[in-house]
């Protein structure tokens, strides 16, 4: 290699080695209280259950669902792809590694908004970005998506579309529920009478 | 924390397109000044007489990695605000194979074909036209490929997390690999008969 290329290669190796041996910045950086207060007042942290459901069905790779409920409830039922994280573990190494993943929208949910709001406040204070709350939690999700309410009065097209989406989403999560109770009668073999065709013409005498 | 300047709200996202044009011009200038508008130069990688493509792209990758990690360490860039292209494994493999074949056959990748077309090279213009026909056919036939296109979704996956190592250690290994490749490529280039173009 030429001399200048050798110097550049050595410089790059030294810089890369510097990254490995430099002490890590593990301290949590707290954000400015004014910024935190603005975030609390704003409601942009809330995502509706319909929006979250839509993103689950679409298999959105940027969506990261964080289930803050106890482990036994998580095992009983959880949203597809959700990760169970106890609120006490939010600021541990595993919690910060999880929440610090780039390119992900972290959506917190519990049974209601109570735990999610606390978790959001703690994490936002320590500069976790792209952090959202599924509004209403699992209770709201179950009431909206699984127990779909029929339209009342004269619904608009938007309402009908929304109900149609929720019905489709319910089938996505729990199946149509129509096949299990349907009794299928045994099919009796139908006897097909064989009709033999009579020869149309008898062989005539040859010449 | 000042970066990324658009994602962190310092500059309005309305400026996205202007930045795209400026960065695109800079990228095009770098490609042209590295000689990437010549298909013979690019194809030299496959025949062993010119490794400038591998050298330029490897250098770009390690300089960008080191720069980002140092800026993040100094608190100037917030890693969590960076957009990371999600990984779709199956389509990435199939697309990589098709792109590799096209690269070896045509002597251009999409970006360099635009550079070649811009300086008036006929092979670049033909490649560029072919690329648009390919894009049109793919778009029309997309329903046939849709399942494969979205299969193997891994989300915004970072390669260091696949190996379970820190980004800093991975970058160090990448720099060592790049320097090793520079030395190896120079050695091969000396052994292979020179091609004048």
Image (spheres, coloured by chain):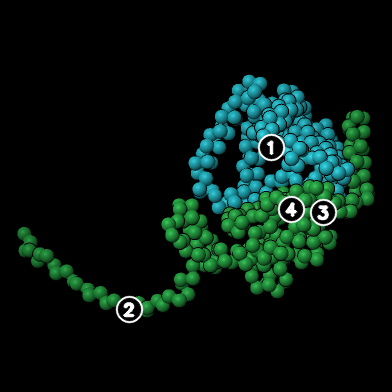
Chain colours: A green, B cyan
Residue at disc 2, secondary structure? loop
> In this rendering, would A155 be left or right of A93?
left
Is there a contact, CB below 8 Å, between mark 1 and mark 4?
Answer: no
Above or below, comparing residue A197 to residue B49 in the picture: below
Which circle's residue, 3 or 2, is located before the other in the chain?
3
Question: Looking at the figure, which quarter contains the C terminus of chain B?
Answer: top right
**Residue matched to label 2:** A188
Which residue is under mark 3? A126
CA distance for labels 1 and 3: 25 Å
Structural crowding at the residue carrying mark 1, measured as other residues with C-alpha within 10 Å and reported as few (<14), some (14–19) or many (≥20): few
Q: Which mark is residue B13?
A: 1
Residues B129 and A41: in front is: A41
Disc 4 to disc 2, how far (Cα)?
68 Å
Q: CA distance from mark 4 to mark 3?
A: 14 Å
Report the quarter where the N terminus of chain B lies: top right
The vertical placement of B154 against A87, above or below, is: above
Q: Which label is found at residue A146?
A: none
Same chain? Circles 4 and 3: yes
Residue A130 x/y as whole percent: 72, 50
| Residue occupying the point 49% across, 67% down | A176
Per the model, the C-alpha gap separating discs 2 and 1 is 69 Å
Instruction: Give the SS element for disc 1.
Output: helix
- The chain to which mark 4 is attached is A
């Amino acid at each position: 290699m030429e001399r200048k290329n050798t110097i550049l290669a050595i410089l790059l190796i030294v810089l890369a080695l510097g990254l490995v041996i430099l002490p890590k910045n593990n301290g949590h950086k707290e954000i400015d209280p004014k910024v935190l207060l603005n975030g609390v007042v704003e409601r942009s942290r809330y995502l509706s259950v319909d929006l979250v459901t839509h993103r689950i069905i679409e298999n959105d790779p940027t969506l990261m669902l964080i289930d803050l409920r106890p482990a036994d409830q998580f095992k009983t039922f959880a949203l597809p792809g959700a990760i169970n994280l106890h609120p006490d573990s939010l600021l541990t190494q595993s919690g910060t590694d999880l929440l610090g993943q780039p390119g992900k929208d972290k959506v917190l949910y519990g049974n209601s908004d109570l735990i999610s709001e606390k978790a959001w406040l703690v994490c936002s204070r320590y500069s976790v970005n792209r952090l959202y709350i599924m509004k209403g939690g699992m209770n709201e999700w179950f009431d909206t998506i699984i127990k779909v309410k029929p339209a009342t009065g004269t619904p608009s097209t938007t309402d009908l579309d929304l109900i149609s989406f929720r019905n489709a989403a319910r089938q996505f999560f729990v199946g149509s529920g129509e096949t299990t109770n349907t009794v299928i009668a045994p099919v009796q073999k139908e006897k097909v009478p064989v009709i033999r065709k009579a020869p149309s013409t008898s062989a005539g005498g040859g010449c | 924390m000042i970066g990324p300047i658009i994602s962190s709200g310092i500059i309005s996202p309305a400026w996205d397109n202007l930045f795209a044009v400026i960065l695109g011009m800079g990228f095009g200038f770098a490609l042209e000044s590295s000689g990437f508008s010549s298909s013979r130069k690019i194809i030299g990688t496959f025949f062993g007489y010119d490794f400038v493509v591998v050298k330029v792209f490897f250098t770009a990758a390690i300089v960008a990695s080191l720069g980002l990690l140092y800026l993040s360490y100094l608190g100037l860039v917030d890693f969590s605000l960076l957009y990371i292209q999600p990984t779709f494994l199956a389509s990435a493999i199939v697309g990589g194979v098709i792109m590799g074949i096209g690269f070896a056959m045509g002597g251009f990748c999409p970006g360099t074909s635009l550079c070649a077309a811009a300086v008036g090279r006929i092979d670049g213009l033909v490649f560029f036209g072919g690329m648009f026909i390919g894009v049109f056919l793919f778009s029309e036939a997309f329903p046939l490929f849709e399942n494969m296109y979205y299969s193997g979704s891994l989300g915004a996956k970072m390669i260091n997390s696949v190996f379970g190592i820190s980004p800093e250690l991975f970058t160090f290994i990448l720099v060592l690999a790049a320097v090793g490749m520079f030395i190896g490529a120079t050695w091969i280039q000396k052994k292979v008969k020179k091609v004048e173009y």
